Amino acid sequence: MSQKNIVAVIDFGGQYTHLIARRIRELGVHSEIFSWKVTPKDLISNETKAIIFSGGPNSVYDKNAPKISDETMKFILDEKIPLLGLCYGHQFISQYFGGKVIPGDQKEYGHTIIQIKDTQFLFKSFSQENKVWMSHGDKVSELPTDFKITASSENCEIAAFENLERNIFGLQFHPEVVHTDNGMVLLSNFLFTISNLEKNWSMESYLEQQIKEIREEIGDNHVIIGVSGGVDSTVSAILLHQSIGNRLFCVFVDHGFMRKDEPDQVEKFFKEDLKFANFYRIDAQKDFLKALKGITEPEEKRKIIAHKFIETFEAIEKKLEKKHGKFGFLAQGTIYPDRIESAQPSDSAAKIKSHHNVALPEKMSMKVIEPLKELYKDEVREIGRLLKIPSELIDRHPFPGPGLSVRILGEVTQERLDTLKEVDAIFIGEIKKRGEYGNYWQTFSVLLPVKSVGVMGDSRTYEWTVVLRSVDSIDAMTADWSKIPYETLAIVSNRIINEVKKVNRVVYDITSKPPATIEWE
């Protein structure tokens, strides 16, 4: 796939930066992400046809706030490349041209209604009012010369602006998130009405290019990949297998943190259904549990699990290389949201949490290859369908690499693991039984280190609390809590209380992302 003719998304460290790029690709246009340190040479070499400045966690007045260089800004303006600034990008553009940015009297986080004043360009086909997603403290209070307001909210008069002569547009809100009504229409207007772009991106072309690049990068080397039966690792494994055949070795590390009966199901799928010649199941349950003994801090849990995975891979590599030769690559099913929340791609992003498959040791004997690292979950599923992977696996709910260890808040013990496995089996089992599994994007249970008083059989109990969590999402960057029917929740709760020892209270999480994350840790 050609790297030319792109929309350049300039990253100021915003958590939604890669979601912007994802939305542009969803509209059929190739997008790439660049640091705010981008140079004219970068933009020229990629034949940049439009530019979007992302949001970010900084104020434009912060000492180390990211800023585009004068040289790059001059190039953008001289070439009249269409420019759209979002949130921090909106504020940066205003300040750069002499406008004024001030701390907001009232910060805006969440849904806001904007009044649209001009429907010719960005807001073409919009009605007078539109619901958008705000997430900002500072705001533009005075526009630069020759800029005009195109939308306002109650707390932000300059919610959008434009300068048609310079081909510059700014939005204080986030059109890239699903919470903004008509966000895709707005981005489409920028791409096709304002920038006059043509569609040049598809998952078919991406798949074709990935297979070619994998073969070129790996050469004659052997590759080890960790598989869990989840969508990301399975799609990665099958993609790699189609690229290099039996030089791929799948290692399933049974760390003990998977759901009830899943280890046996994973082994059957790879050995019997897919008929992979090189599949190895490693029983490391005791080692992982021992490594987490006494650990309660979630970041430390993830890092310990990440290092334990690498130790396990390198140990099996040494055994296998005696028979098959040197292994040069460790493959992972890392996807974009993992890297974003771990602040991997950005100079300025704030870390949300480390993911086990991006928190790698500095020194490794193998090179890491991540064939899905540029994709979001829905794109991974699309690739899986192109690879003809069965729908029951492709549509499986996401499951974190560290498994139930990060769904047990506090120390992970065998007793707590066994308890959560039973709770989760009941929850997922009932959802499937009632034909509701496909209605939700991710459904799971969390065990809290909290005990509460209850009454069972006229006796006082003092047992654990579990949380049921289900969310609806497209790409894991934003999510809303699922409206599971009360009848279903009642059945699940009754079964858990009656069938699972050590649990006497069940609660349901109704928090969206943001402000929460999907997982509790």
Image (cartoon, rainbow, N blue to C red):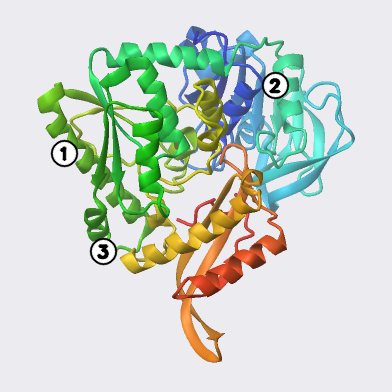
| Element carrying mark 3 | loop
Looking at this rendering, what residue extends furthest in the left direction?
Answer: 322
Looking at this rendering, what residue extends furthest in the right direction?
Answer: 128
Q: Where is residue 154 in the image (x, y as percent from the top left)?
A: 81, 48
Q: Please report the residue visible at 77 percent of the width from the left and 33 percent of the height from the top.
A: 182
Q: Is residue 36 above or below residue 359?
A: above
Give the Cα separation between the discs numbered 2 and 1: 55 Å
| Element carrying mark 2 | strand
Hey, what amino acid is under mark 3?
Lys
Answer whether residue 6 is visible to the viewer in this image. Answer: yes
> For the residues carrying marks 2 and 1, which lies nearer the camera in this image?
1
| Element carrying mark 1 | helix
Q: Where is residue 199 in the image (x, y as percent from the top left)?
A: 65, 12
Answer whether residue 334 is visible to the viewer in this image. Answer: no
> For the residues carrying marks 3 and 1, which lies nearer the camera in this image?
1
Hey, what amino acid is under mark 1?
Ala
- How many numbered callouts? 3
Residue density around tag 3, few if under 14, some if 14–19, many if 20 or more, within 10 Å? few
Q: Please report the residue visible at 78 percent of the width from the left and 25 percent of the height from the top.
A: 122
| Quadrant assignment, res 441 | top right
Looking at this rendering, what residue extends furthest in the front direction?
Answer: 272
Task: Name the residue nearer the viewer: 282 or 188.
Answer: 282
> For the residues carrying marks 2 and 3, which lies nearer the camera in this image?
3
Q: Position of residue 169 (x, y in %)?
A: 71, 25
Q: Is residue 12 above or below residue 188?
A: below
Q: Please report the residue visible at 41 percent of the width from the left and 39 percent of the height from the top.
A: 229
Give the Cα separation between the discs numbered 2 and 3: 56 Å
Hey, what amino acid is under mark 2?
Ile
Query: In the rendered image, which residue does mark 3 sit on?
Result: 293
Q: Which mark is residue 168?
A: 2
Query: In the rendered image, which residue does mark 1 sit on?
Result: 315
Sequence order check: which comes first, mark 2 or mark 3?
A: 2
